[in-house]
Image (spheres, helix red, strand yellow):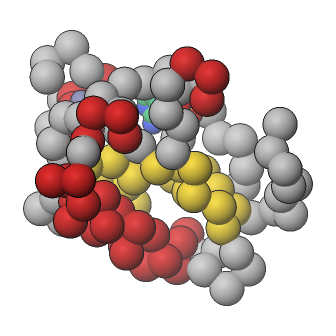
Amino acid sequence: MSDCIFCRIAAKEIPAKVVYEDDRIIAFDDIRPQAPVHTLIIPRTHLASLNEAGPERADLLGHILAKAPEIAEIKGVKASGFRLVINTGPDSGQDVFHIHAHLLGGRKMQWPPG
Ligand code: 5GP
Ligand code: ZN
């Protein structure tokens, strides 16, 4: 989708600090980090949110989860711990409507989240 900022980052039309990429996903640092490590993991395929993904995307969504520890390792937070967050829909505060998992780490985090 040409008007989607994350599609444009995946297509390298907009610069980003890329941490990891393969044929299905790309991970890059968030432009407004909320923790010392704040990396976004997105599918290359445009999907607006988890609400639109559906069970037929289980492999792709699983790939994002399965790769998270490797991406955390690259960022140096695999052992210390990290949090994955997928904001979905209005109450979550989702702002960019291309599925993304926030990988946050590098500081002690609170539970429950605000
Ligand atoms: P959401 O609120 O949708 O879950 O999170 C969207 C995230 O995307 C925010 O943390 C925001 O800082 C990040 N973001 C928005 N635009 C850009 C951009 O152009 N580049 C990068 N690297 N991150 C972005
Ligand atoms: Zn997109």
Question: Which residue corresponds to the image point at 65% horizontal and 61% vertical from the top-left?
Answer: 83
Residue 40 visible somewhere in the drawing: no
Q: Position of residue 48 (x, y in %)?
A: 30, 29
Up-down relation of residue 96 to residue 22 (above or below): above
- Closest to the observer, 74 or 64: 64
Residue 54 screen position, x and y as percent: 24, 45
| Image quadrant assignment for residue 6 | top left
Q: Is residue 65 left or right of residue 93?
A: left
Instruction: Report the number of numbered marks.
Output: 0
Please name whichever residue, 71 or 83, is drawn nearer the observer in this view of the structure. 83
Q: Quadrant of residue 97?
A: top left
Image quadrant in which the C terminus is located? top right
**Percent coordinates x, y for residue 25 in the rendering:** 24, 56
On the question of residue 62 being in view, the answer is yes
- Going 31% across and 67% down the picture, which residue do you hit? 62
Residue at image coords 43%, 78%: 70
- x 49%, y 33%: residue: 88
Left or right, 45 with respect to 77, comes to: left
Where residue 9 sits: x, y (%)?
A: 27, 35
